[in-house]
């Protein structure tokens, strides 16, 4: 991998953005103008790793998927170096085949996506009766559920605010944890069942001991992970709203 | 059906004009079945012919609108040439276009539906959590029940709004996989490869 010179061109990939490891592979195959059915695995692996190295320095969050593919590439490369036991079986045994089929399938869906993009573009130029209502509905939905998903940082900040308020009450309850996460999950479900939404703050019952609030917070995290609820924030550092998610259990 | 006194002079009460009036007044696509249900002594096939006839009229008269086939139905829409002026009518900014990950995910759902998240992630090679939420919110996909597999995963399918959003008459209007240009060319070798994997599959089953 260190021998960049052998490729003849150290690629400036950092500036490009890829949807995922397969997207990057499609790009590399096209750029190098190699035969998809006879991928020079050493060259592609080398360039792939160059990109992953550059990327992990900047955005770590999506690096995992790329690293997984890097491992697959290196495994295939190693398998290619092993002597083939039976030359007649060479094609059937090609360690690259599974990956090649994946690249081809992904490439096909990329093309269909382009096709949809064309349809989207031309559709936007056609107007029918009722298009204003159509737009209004969409905007209302966007307002109700702002696209900004609350991050873990936002949640912790909101929780810290709630706890700060509790601290101001200066009442100290010393008691065993009298509430379970399941109970709080039920409580949150009950609150959401009516309107399908609630503010983050409202879920913390005033007068309850702090320990209960911590359980409420853990219950919220658990429900978000299960897809039972969605946490949204209208603006940066704004109030967080809780919405019913696709996996909501009545 | 019609109050004669309300009919302006010269109005023609033939089926063609009635279809035209219905399409003009409707604010969503009408199917040939719906139209046939509203007009006496017509069949969906007759409606299809009449719509084609109307389309030909509009084209001949160079009208500013035409009939588009959307989501299994017909809808009168303005021609794209006039979009710039109609845009001025709206107060709000144009709606955001879908992102590339959203389009790729939709493409897979459209072809593989009903489909679970794992399969979408396996094909795209990345997590599709956030994208699925956006698509659900925008009403382009919906949950179509649960799969049989481990943990009974949620299955997704495209909605009627998906067809309206892209102005597609139906799912079959999307290109067939074999019609797609394979940029890597060499279709024969691809088929050979697929054939081999089938042979493998059969061989594995035989074992």
Image (cartoon, coloured by chain):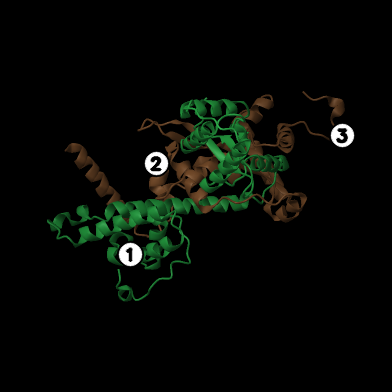
* Residue in view at x 65 percent, y 25 percent: B37
Q: Is residue A172 left or right of residue B196?
A: right
Q: Which residue corresponds to mark 2?
A: B118
Residue A44, label in figure: 1
Image colour assigned to chain A: green
User: Which quadrant would the C terminus of chain B be assigned to in this image?
Assistant: top left
Say what secondary structure mark 1 lies in: helix
Residue holding disc 3:
B9
Subunit ID for the residue under disc 3 = B
Q: Which chain is brown?
A: B
Nearer mark to the viewer, of 1 and 3: 1
Between the C-alphas of marks 1 and 3, the distance is 76 Å
B74 up-or-down from B176: above or below: above
Residue A20: tell me if it is visible. Answer: yes
| Left or right: residue A116 compared with residue B5 | left
Image coordinates for residue A177, horizontal then vertical, percent? 47, 28
């Amino acid at each position: 991998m260190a021998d960049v010179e052998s490729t003849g061109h150290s690629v400036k990939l950092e500036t490009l953005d890829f949807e995922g490891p397969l997207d990057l592979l499609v790009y590399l195959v096209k750029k190098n103008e190699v035969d998809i059915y006879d991928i020079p695995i050493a060259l592609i692996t080398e360039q792939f790793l160059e990109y992953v190295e550059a990327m992990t320095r900047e955005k770590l969050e999506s690096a995992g998927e790329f690293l997984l593919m890097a491992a697959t590439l290196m495994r295939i490369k190693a398998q290619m170096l092993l002597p083939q036991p039976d030359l007649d079986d060479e094609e059937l045994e090609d360690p690259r085949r599974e990956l090649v089929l994946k690249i081809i399938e992904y490439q096909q869906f990329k093309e269909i996506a382009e096709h949809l993009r064309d349809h989207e573009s031309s559709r936007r130029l056609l107007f029918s009766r009722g298009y204003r209502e159509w737009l209004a509905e969409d905007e209302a939905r966007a307002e109700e559920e702002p696209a900004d998903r609350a991050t873990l940082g936002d949640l912790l900040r909101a929780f810290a605010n709630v706890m700060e308020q509790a601290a101001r009450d200066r009442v100290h309850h010393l008691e065993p944890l009298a509430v379970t996460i399941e109970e709080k999950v039920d409580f949150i479900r009950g609150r959401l069942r009516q309107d399908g939404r609630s503010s983050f703050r409202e879920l913390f019952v005033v007068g309850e001991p702090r320990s209960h609030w911590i359980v409420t917070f853990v219950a919220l995290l658990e429900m978000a992970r299960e897809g039972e609820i969605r946490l949204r924030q209208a603006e940066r550092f704004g109030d967080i709203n809780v919405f019913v998610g696709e996996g909501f259990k009545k | 059906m019609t109050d004669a006194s309300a009919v302006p002079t010269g109005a023609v009460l033939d089926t063609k004009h009635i279809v035209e009036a219905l399409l003009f007044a409707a604010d969503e696509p009408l199917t040939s079945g719906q139209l046939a249900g509203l007009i006496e002594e017509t069949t969906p096939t007759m409606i299809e012919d009449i719509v084609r006839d109307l389309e030909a009229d509009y084209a001949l008269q160079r009208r500013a609108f035409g009939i588009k086939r959307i989501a299994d139905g017909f809808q009168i829409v303005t021609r794209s040439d006039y979009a710039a002026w109609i845009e001025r009518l709206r107060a709000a900014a144009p709606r955001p276009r879908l992102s590339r990950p959203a389009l790729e995910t939709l493409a897979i759902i459209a072809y593989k539906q009903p489909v679970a998240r794992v399969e979408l992630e396996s094909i795209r090679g990345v997590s599709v959590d956030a994208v699925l939420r956006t698509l659900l919110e925008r009403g382009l996909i919906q949950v179509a029940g649960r799969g049989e597999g481990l943990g009974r995963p949620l299955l997704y399918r495209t909605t009627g709004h998906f067809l309206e959003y892209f102005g597609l008459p139906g799912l079959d209007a999307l290109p067939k996989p074999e019609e797609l240009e394979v940029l890597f060319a060499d279709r024969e070798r691809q088929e050979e490869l697929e054939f081999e994997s089938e042979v493998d599959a059969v061989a594995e089953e035989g074992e």
